[in-house]
Image (cartoon, rainbow, N blue to C red):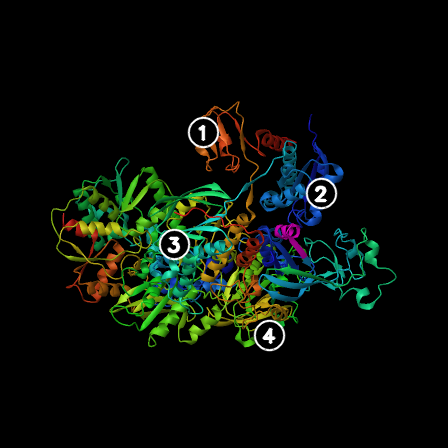
C-alpha cells in the first residue's frame, strides 16, 4: 500500500482541467512500449476520491519526462509534473530502485551521480589550457557530470573546448567546484536533495557573479534556465552560443566535412525549450555537410529514453528500446552520421547502434564534435 | 391594406424582444402572455451561463420596457383563442381571463396573499412545484405587471362557492381591488403580422422511472434546482432539501434527450451548459461538497462556453463520462449506477442530491396553436421552420413568424437573435403599410 | 435665486443580492440624515413597477427635485430610473445612481465594512446630486440608408432585410464576388443541400434589388459620424465614394485556422493531410483523389486549433463537429469502399436535426473514436495517426491515405484594423464583442453599429442568417423612426479660459472638437461628442467640463467620500 491523498493532489496539480482527450497518451513515447498512460493515471486520481494507491504502478518510472504530453495538452495540464510528484511519494517512502538510490547517494556525497571522485572532475581538460571561471570572465562553461566523467562524454567536452578556443570565446570552468545540476534528481522525485543542490549551486554562481553560462547538456540547460530561481544569470545551451558565433562570423570553418548527416532533436532542447533551429544552423554552416531530416523531427522527435532518470532505470519493458527504433529511422534516411546535442542521447543512441550492429553504416556524433572536425 | 400592427404570442424573452423591436420601429404591438406576468422561463433562472449574470437582473429591464412601452399593449393572463385572415390583415381573438383583481387599483402590496386562508398551502407553479403560495398571488416579486391574480383552481370561493363569512383578501386590500364579478373578456385585434414565441416545457422525468424521480426526494430536475438556487425561490437561494445541505451532488445529463428509447432522439442543446452553471453554483453555495457530472458529450459550443467549462472543472467538479443506468436507494443516500466509459468499469456513486438535466419539449398547447394558425410541426412537435438554413424564423404561413424555443431548443443569445430576426421579417411586412398609408418615397442616395 | 435641493434617496435590496451583505435599512437611515435629503427609503426591488412607483409618488407628493437610487450598476438600470424620473416630471439628468451592488455587496464579504462602504457611496451620490443640472436631450434626423460591410451570407441577408423594409443599402465587399466563405462550400449540414444554391439565392436577390448598391473589390477606408448620421469613405475600382448611412452592419466574417500552427500534424509537409475547407473544395470538384488515387482509409481529426490552450485558442469553433460529420458522410457517398474514422473529444451535434444526422453518419459506417490524436508520422506510402483511444484505454495507430483536419474559425487578420475603423471592442477570443453576451448579441458599444455573422463568433449558416436578420432589425429601428436621441452629457468649453491650443482635439476620438476660425477658441459639436471626457483631462487650462461630470460635481463626490472616510 502506498496511499496518497488524491483530492488535494489533483487540485494542486490542476488535474481537474483534464477533459480526458487522450492526446498525452497518444503521443507518449513510452506508450509505444509500456502500459504508461498519463491520461489513465490522471483519471484514476480524479475518481479515486481521497485515497489513491500507488502500489504496483511501476510504469510511473518509465516516464522519460520528455514533456510531449505537456507540450500538446489542449487544457495545459502537465502530466509529466504529476508523474514526477507521484515519484516523490515513492521516494519519500524510500521505495526506489537500488540504481537510483546509489545515484542519489553519490550525488549527495560526490556531487555527481556516477560515483566518481570529486577531485577528478577536471581530469577531462587536463591538457587543454582551460582557465578556471572567476568574476570577470564572460562565460561560465558548465560542463556537466556525464561530459566530465564519462569517456564518450569527455570527447564532446574536449571537442567543444577546441571550437570555443578557435572562436576566441572568453570562458572558464568550475573544475572540482562544479556540482551536479540535479536535473535528474528532480525528475526522479527527490525534492529534498534537489533543493539542497539548488541552494549550493545558486550560492556558488552568486558568489562568483556569473553573468552568462552555457552547458553541454540540454538537461543542465533546462534546469538552470527553468527550474532554478530567477537570478538574472543568462543560461544558454552551447548550440545557441555556436549559432551566434557562426552568425557573427566569429566561428569560421577552414576544413570541411563531406558527410550526410541527420539530426536527432533532444527532447530537452526541442520539446522542452523550442530550440530546433540553432543546432541546425550550426550544422548547415559546416562546409560540405549535407543535412537530411528524419520524418520524426523537431516536435515529433522520438525520445531516446535517456531522460527522466532513465539512465539509471531499465524500465518495465527493456526488450524494446526506442533508441534502436531511432537508429533505424536514421539509417532509413541514408545518413552516415546521426548528430545530436545531448550527452544522454549520444550515449543511448551510440549503444543502440552497437546493438543493431550498424557501426559500419552510421556513427553517432555530437554537434560539437562535428564542428571541431571542420575547424 | 396592411395593418401596421403585430401580434406577439408569448411573453418570455423571445416574445418580449420581438415586441420591443417592432414597437421601437414605430408599430403597434399586442403582446399576449398566458401567465399572470411577462418573463417566461428566463425569470425562473437564477444565473445565466456563461457570464453568471443574474437572470432576473438582465431580464427585468426588458420586461419593464415592454410593460411601459407606449406602442406595446400588454395582455397578460390572456390567451389567443382564434386567428383568421392572411398576411397583412389578420384578425385575432384574445381572451382575457379574469384575475378577479382590478388591475387599475392593485398596487402589488401583497396584503391579500398574506391574509388569504390558503396562504402557504398552494404549490407554486413558478417554483416548479416546490414552495407554497396563497390562492391569490404574483408569480415572482419582479412581475410585470405587478398585479395579483386569483388562482381559480385553488381559490376556495371560486371552487366551492364560499370562503367563510368574508373574503379575507378583500378585507385586507387597502385599494378595494378584489372583484369576484370579473368574467372572461374577449378582445379582437387586427394585425399585419404574428410572431409565435410560446416557449417550451421540460421533459417529465417520471418517464424514466429507473431514476426514481418522484419517488426519491433526493432526485430533482434542473428546473427545480434552478428554483432552489434562486433568491426568489422557495429556499431563498439556499440549496437545501428538507433543510439539509447536500454534500454529494450528482448531475446526470441527457435525461429525455438523445434518447430513441422514449422517442426523444434530438439534443436539447442547452443542458450541458445549464448543468455546468448549476455545478458551479452548487460548488459556490455548498462548500466542501463533492460534485460529479455524468455526461456523454459535453456540448459547450457557444461564445465563452468552453472557457466556462474549463473554469468549472478547475473548481474541482468531476466530469465522468457515462450515461447512468439507474438510481437505487442505499440507506440514507441514493446510489447512481453507471459505467465510467473512460475507466471501462461500472461504478456506483453515492449521492444526497441528484439533478436530472431534463430535455426541452414543445408545450402541450403547441398542437392547438398550430391548428389555429395552420402551422406545421416537426417530428419532435416543435413548430416547423420553412427552411432549416435560410428561414428558421419563418413558419411557412405568410405573415406568421417563429421566435425562440417553440421552434427548437436554444439558449438566451440565440433566442434573442431569432426573436429580432422574426421582428425584422415582421417589420418588413408592416413597413408595406407605411408605404400604402403615407406614400413615402423611397429616399435614394445618389448612385455612383 | 438659490436652489434648494430636495433629494429622494432609495436604497434597493435587490432581493438578497445587496441585502445579504449590506444592511440596507441602516444605509437608508444614514441617508435620511444627509444634507439636502428630503426622504430616504429602502425597498426590495427598485427596478420593479412598484419600486418606480415609489419614486414617482414621492416626487409628486414631497416635491422632490433630485433623485438618488442606490442599487446595481448604472449600466443595468440607469435608463430605467431616468425614464421613471422623467415620467414623474423631472429632467432625467436630475437623477444619480450609487452602485452598491457590483461595487459593494457583490465584491465584499457581508458585514459592517460593506455597509459603511455603501453609506459612503450613497453620500457621494447625494453630494453630486445637489450639483446636478437638468440637461436637454436632442433629436437628430436619421439618414434613411444603411451601410453593410461584408458580402457573405450575413451581409447579404442583412442588406436584403433593410432594403425590403424600404431603405437604401450600400453593400461593400472586399473580394470580386459576393458569397464569402460559403461560396466555396459544397453541402450543408444536416440536410446535405447544395450550398451554392443557397448562396445563389441570396446573391441573385441582392443583385436584383433596386435599393441595394453593391460595391465589390471595395474597402471601407474611414467611418465618421454617429448613429443616424454616419459617413463612410469607400474605395472601389473606379475611385473613392462618400456613403452616408443611418446605421452600419459589420459582417466581415472569419478565417480558417492555419493548420501549420500544429506542426505535429504535418499539414503542408504531407500531401495526405488536408483541412476541412480543402476537403470541401475537393469534394465539390467531383473527384476525391489523393496522390492520384481514391483514398481507402480516411481519418478526420476534430478540434484542430480549437479548445486548445497550448495555442492560445481556448474556444470552441462550434461548427466543426457537424462539418466533419457531413464530410464523413460525403466520403461514404463518394468512396463506398473507403473506411472512415473520426477522432473526437466531444461530439457537439446540438442543433435541430444534428443529433439525428450524427446517428445517420454512424449508421452509414463511419467509426467515431474518442481521442485527440497526438501526431501524424509517415510510414511508407501512407501516414499514421497516433492517438489514444480513450474508450479502449489503449494507444492506437491508424494508417491513412487521407487525413482531414477539422480546423476552427479564427478572427480575420484585419480585425484589429476594422476594429479601429469603427471603434469596436473585441472579446477575449479576438472576435468582435457584442454589447451584452446574453441580451444584446448584435449591438456594439457604438450606437448604430451592429454585428452579424462569424465576425462576432463562430456560427453556422442558420445562426448567421438569424443574426443577420437580427442586426437588420436593430438597424431598422432608427431608420424607421427617422430620428434618434443624442447623448446629452457632452463636453462644454468655458471660452474665457480656452486658449485655443488644440490639445483637446488631438485626443478626441470622435472628431468633435474644432478651432473656431473667428473667436480663436475651441468649440464642441454636441452631436458628435460622446461625453467620454478625454478632452477635459487633456485641457491644460481646465477650460473643458463634461456636463453631468463637471468639476464641481465630481469634487463634491470626492469630498463626500473623504469626509465620510475620516468620520
| Same chain, labels 2 and 4 | no
In the image, residue B416 above or below residue C93? below
Q: Tag on residue C56?
A: 2
Q: Are marks 4 and 3 on the same chain?
A: no
Mark closer to the chain start, 3 or 2: 2
The tag earlier along the polypeptide, 1 or 3, is 3
**Does the magenta-highlighted stretch encompass residue A127?**
no
View extreme (right): residue: B165
Total marks in image: 4
Crowding near the residue tagged with mark 4, few <14, some 14–19, many ≥20 C-alpha atoms within 10 Å: few
Mark 3 sits on what residue? C311
Asked if residue C371 can be seen in this view, the reply is no
Whole-percent x and y of residue A322? 28, 64
Name the element at disc 3.
helix
Q: Inspect the magenta stretch and tell me whether residue B69 lies in it.
A: yes
Q: Is residue A170 visible?
A: yes
Q: Nearer the viewer, mark 3 or mark 2?
A: 2
Q: Secondary structure at mark 4?
A: helix
Q: Nearer the viewer, mark 1 or mark 4?
A: 1
Residue B98 at x, y percent in the picture: 75, 61
**Magenta stretch in the rendered image:** B60-74
Q: Nearer the viewer, residue C482 or A220?
A: C482
Amino acid at each position: 500500500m502506498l496511499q496518497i491523498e488524491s483530492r488535494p493532489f489533483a487540485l494542486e496539480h490542476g488535474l481537474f482541467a483534464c477533459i480526458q482527450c487522450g492526446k498525452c497518451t497518444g503521443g507518449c513515447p513510452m506508450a509505444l512500449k509500456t502500459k504508461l498512460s498519463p491520461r489513465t493515471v490522471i483519471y484514476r486520481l480524479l475518481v479515486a476520491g481521497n485515497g489513491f494507491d500507488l502500489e504496483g504502478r511501476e510504469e510511473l518510472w518509465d516516464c522519460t519526462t520528455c514533456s510531449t504530453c505537456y507540450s500538446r495538452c489542449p487544457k495545459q495540464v502537465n502530466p509529466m509534473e504529476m508523474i514526477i510528484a507521484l515519484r516523490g511519494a515513492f521516494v519519500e517512502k524510500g521505495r526506489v530502485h537500488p540504481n537510483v538510490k546509489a545515484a542519489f547517494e553519490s550525488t549527495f556525497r560526490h556531487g555527481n551521480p556516477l560515483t566518481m571522485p570529486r577531485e577528478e572532475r577536471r581530469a577531462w581538460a587536463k591538457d587543454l589550457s582551460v582557465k578556471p571561471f572567476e568574476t570577470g570572465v564572460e562565460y561560465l562553461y558548465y560542463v556537466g557530470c556525464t561530459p566530465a566523467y564519462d569517456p564518450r562524454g569527455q570527447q564532446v567536452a574536449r571537442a567543444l573546448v577546441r571550437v570555443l578556443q578557435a572562436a576566441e570565446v572568453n570562458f572558464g570552468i568550475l573544475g572540482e567546484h562544479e556540482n551536479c545540476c540535479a536535473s535528474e534528481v528532480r525528475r526522479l522525485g527527490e525534492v529534498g536533495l534537489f533543493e539542497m543542490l539548488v541552494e549550493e549551486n545558486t550560492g556558488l554562481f552568486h558568489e562568483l557573479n556569473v553573468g552568462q553560462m552555457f552547458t553541454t547538456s540540454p538537461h543542465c540547460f533546462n534546469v538552470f534556465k527553468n527550474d532554478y530561481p530567477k537570478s538574472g544569470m543568462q543560461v544558454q545551451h552551447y548550440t545557441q552560443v555556436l549559432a551566434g558565433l557562426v552568425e557573427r562570423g566569429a566561428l569560421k570553418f577552414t576544413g570541411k566535412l563531406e558527410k550526410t548527416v541527420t539530426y536527432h532533436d533532444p527532447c530537452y532542447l526541442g520539446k522542452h525549450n523550442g530550440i530546433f533551429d540553432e543546432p541546425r544552423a550550426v550544422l548547415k554552416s559546416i562546409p560540405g555537410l549535407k543535412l537530411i531530416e528524419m520524418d520524426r523531427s523537431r516536435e515529433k522527435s522520438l525520445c531516446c529514453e535517456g531522460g527522466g532518470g532513465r539512465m539509471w532505470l531499465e524500465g518495465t519493458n527493456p526488450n524494446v528500446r526506442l533508441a534502436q527504433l531511432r537508429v533505424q529511422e536514421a539509417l532509413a534516411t541514408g545518413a552516415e552520421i546521426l548528430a545530436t546535442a545531448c550527452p544522454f542521447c549520444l550515449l543511448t543512441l551510440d549503444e543502440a547502434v552497437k546493438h543493431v550492429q550498424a557501426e559500419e553504416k552510421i556513427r553517432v556524433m555530437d554537434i560539437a564534435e562535428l564542428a571541431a572536425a571542420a575547424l | 391594406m396592411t395593418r401596421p400592427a403585430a401580434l406577439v404570442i408569448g411573453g418570455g424573452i423571445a416574445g418580449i424582444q420581438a415586441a420591443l423591436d417592432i414597437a421601437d420601429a414605430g408599430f403597434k404591438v399586442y403582446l399576449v402572455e398566458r401567465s399572470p406576468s411577462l418573463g417566461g422561463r428566463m425569470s425562473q433562472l437564477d444565473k445565466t451561463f456563461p457570464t453568471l449574470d443574474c437572470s432576473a437582473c438582465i431580464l427585468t429591464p426588458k420586461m419593464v420596457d415592454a410593460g411601459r412601452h407606449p406602442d406595446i399593449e400588454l395582455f397578460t393572463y390572456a390567451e389567443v383563442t382564434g386567428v383568421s385572415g392572411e398576411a397583412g390583415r389578420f384578425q385575432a381573438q384574445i381572451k382575457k381571463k379574469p384575475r378577479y383583481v382590478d388591475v387599475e387599483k392593485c398596487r402589488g402590496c401583497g396584503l391579500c396573499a398574506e391574509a388569504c386562508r390558503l396562504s402557504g398551502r398552494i404549490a407554486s407553479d413558478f417554483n416548479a412545484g416546490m414552495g407554497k403560495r396563497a390562492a391569490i398571488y404574483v408569480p415572482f416579486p419582479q412581475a410585470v405587471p405587478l398585479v395579483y391574480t386569483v388562482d381559480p383552481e385553488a381559490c376556495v370561493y371560486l371552487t366551492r362557492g364560499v370562503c367563510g363569512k368574508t373574503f379575507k383578501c378583500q378585507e385586507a386590500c387597502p385599494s378595494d381591488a378584489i372583484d369576484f364579478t370579473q368574467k372572461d373578456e374577449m378582445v379582437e385585434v387586427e394585425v399585419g403580422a404574428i410572431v409565435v414565441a410560446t416557449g417550451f416545457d421540460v421533459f417529465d422525468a417520471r418517464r424514466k422511472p429507473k431514476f426514481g424521480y418522484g419517488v426519491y426526494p433526493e432526485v430533482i430536475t434542473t428546473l427545480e434546482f434552478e428554483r432552489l438556487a434562486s433568491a426568489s425561490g422557495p429556499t431563498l437561494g439556499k440549496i437545501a432539501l428538507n433543510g439539509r445541505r447536500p454534500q454529494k451532488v450528482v448531475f446526470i445529463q441527457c435525461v429525455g434527450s438523445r434518447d430513441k428509447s422514449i422517442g426523444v432522439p434530438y439534443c436539447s442543446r442547452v443542458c450541458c451548459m445549464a448543468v455546468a452553471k448549476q455545478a458551479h453554483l452548487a460548488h459556490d453555495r455548498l462548500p466542501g461538497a463533492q460534485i460529479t457530472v455524468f455526461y456523454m458529450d459535453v456540448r459547450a459550443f457557444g461564445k465563452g462556453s468552453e472557457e466556462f467549462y474549463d473554469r468549472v472543472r478547475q473548481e474541482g467538479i468531476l466530469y465522468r463520462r457515462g450515461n447512468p443506468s439507474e438510481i437505487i436507494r442505499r440507506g440514507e443516500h441514493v446510489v447512481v449506477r453507471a459505467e465510467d466509459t473512460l475507466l471501462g468499469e461500472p461504478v456506483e456513486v453515492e449521492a444526497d442530491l441528484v439533478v436530472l438535466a431534463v430535455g426541452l419539449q414543445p408545450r402541450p398547447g403547441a398542437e392547438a396553436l398550430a391548428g389555429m394558425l395552420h402551422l406545421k410541426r416537426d417530428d419532435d412537435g416543435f413548430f416547423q421552420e420553412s427552411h432549416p438554413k435560410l428561414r428558421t424564423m419563418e413558419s411557412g404561413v405568410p405573415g406568421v413568424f417563429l421566435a425562440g424555443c417553440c421552434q427548437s431548443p436554444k439558449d438566451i443569445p440565440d433566442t434573442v437573435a431569432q426573436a429580432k430576426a422574426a421582428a425584422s421579417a415582421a417589420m418588413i411586412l408592416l413597413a408595406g403599410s407605411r408605404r400604402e398609408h403615407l406614400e413615402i418615397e423611397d429616399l435614394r442616395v445618389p448612385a455612383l | 435665486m438659490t436652489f434648494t435641493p430636495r433629494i429622494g434617496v432609495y436604497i434597493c435590496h435587490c432581493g438578497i443580492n445587496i441585502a445579504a451583505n449590506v444592511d440596507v435599512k441602516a444605509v437608508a437611515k444614514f441617508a435620511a440624515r444627509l444634507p439636502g435629503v428630503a426622504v430616504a427609503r429602502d425597498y426590495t426591488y427598485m427596478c420593479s413597477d412598484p419600486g418606480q412607483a415609489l419614486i414617482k409618488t414621492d416626487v409628486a407628493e414631497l416635491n422632490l427635485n433630485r433623485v438618488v437610487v442606490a442599487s446595481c450598476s448604472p449600466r443595468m438600470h440607469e435608463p430605467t430610473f431616468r425614464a421613471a424620473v422623467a415620467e414623474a416630471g423631472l429632467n432625467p439628468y436630475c437623477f444619480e445612481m450609487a452602485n452598491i451592488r457590483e461595487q459593494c455587496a457583490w465584491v465584499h464579504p457581508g458585514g459592517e465594512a460593506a455597509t459603511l462602504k455603501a453609506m459612503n457611496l450613497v453620500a457621494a451620490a447625494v453630494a453630486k446630486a445637489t450639483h446636478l443640472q437638468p440637461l436637454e436631450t436632442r433629436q437628430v434626423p436619421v439618414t434613411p440608408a444603411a451601410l453593410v460591410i461584408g458580402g457573405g451570407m450575413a451581409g447579404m441577408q442583412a442588406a436584403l432585410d433593410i432594403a425590403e423594409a424600404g431603405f437604401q443599402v450600400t453593400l461593400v465587399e472586399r473580394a470580386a464576388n459576393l458569397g464569402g466563405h460559403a461560396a466555396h462550400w459544397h453541402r450543408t449540414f444536416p440536410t446535405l443541400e447544395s450550398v451554392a444554391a443557397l448562396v445563389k439565392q441570396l446573391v441573385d436577390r441582392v443583385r436584383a434589388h433596386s435599393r441595394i448598391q453593391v460595391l465589390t473589390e471595395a474597402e471601407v477606408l474611414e467611418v465618421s459620424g454617429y448613429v443616424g448620421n454616419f459617413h463612410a469613405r469607400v474605395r472601389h475600382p473606379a475611385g473613392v465614394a462618400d456613403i452616408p448611412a443611418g446605421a452600419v452592419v459589420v459582417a466581415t466574417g472569419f478565417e480558417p485556422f492555419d493548420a501549420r500552427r500544429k506542426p505535429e500534424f504535418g499539414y503542408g509537409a504531407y500531401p495526405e493531410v488536408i483541412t476541412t475547407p480543402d476537403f470541401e473544395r475537393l469534394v465539390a470538384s467531383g473527384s476525391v483523389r489523393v496522390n492520384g488515387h481514391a483514398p481507402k482509409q480516411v481519418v478526420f481529426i476534430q478540434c484542430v486549433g480549437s479548445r486548445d490552450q497550448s495555442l492560445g485558442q481556448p474556444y470552441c469553433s462550434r461548427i466543426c463537429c457537424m462539418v466533419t460529420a457531413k464530410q464523413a458522410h460525403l466520403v461514404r457517398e463518394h468512396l463506398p469502399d473507403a473506411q472512415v474514422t473520426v477522432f473526437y473529444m466531444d461530439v457537439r451535434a446540438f442543433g435541430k436535426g444534428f443529433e439525428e444526422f450524427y446517428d445517420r453518419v454512424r449508421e452509414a459506417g463511419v467509426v467515431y473514436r474518442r481521442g485527440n490524436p497526438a501526431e501524424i508520422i509517415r510510414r511508407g506510402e501512407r501516414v499514421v495517426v497516433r492517438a489514444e483511444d480513450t474508450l479502449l484505454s489503449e494507444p492506437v495507430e491508424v494508417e491513412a491515405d487521407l487525413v482531414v483536419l477539422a480546423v476552427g474559425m479564427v478572427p480575420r487578420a484585419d480585425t484589429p484594423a476594422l476594429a479601429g475603423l469603427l471603434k469596436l471592442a473585441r472579446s477575449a477570443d479576438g472576435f468582435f464583442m457584442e454589447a451584452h453576451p446574453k441580451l444584446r448579441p448584435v449591438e456594439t458599444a457604438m450606437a448604430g453599429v451592429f454585428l452579424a455573422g462569424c465576425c462576432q463568433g463562430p456560427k453556422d449558416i442558420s445562426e448567421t442568417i438569424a443574426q443577420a436578420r437580427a442586426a437588420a432589425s436593430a438597424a431598422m429601428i432608427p431608420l424607421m423612426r427617422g430620428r434618434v436621441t443624442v447623448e446629452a452629457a457632452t463636453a462644454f468649453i468655458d471660452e474665457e479660459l480656452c486658449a485655443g491650443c488644440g490639445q483637446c482635439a488631438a485626443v478626441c476620438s470622435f472628431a468633435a472638437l474644432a478651432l473656431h476660425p473667428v473667436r480663436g477658441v475651441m468649440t464642441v459639436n454636441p452631436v458628435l461628442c460622446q461625453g467620454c471626457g478625454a478632452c477635459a483631462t487633456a485641457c491644460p487650462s481646465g477650460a473643458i467640463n463634461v456636463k453631468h461630470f463637471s468639476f464641481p460635481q465630481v469634487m463634491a463626490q470626492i469630498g463626500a467620500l473623504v469626509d465620510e472616510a475620516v468620520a
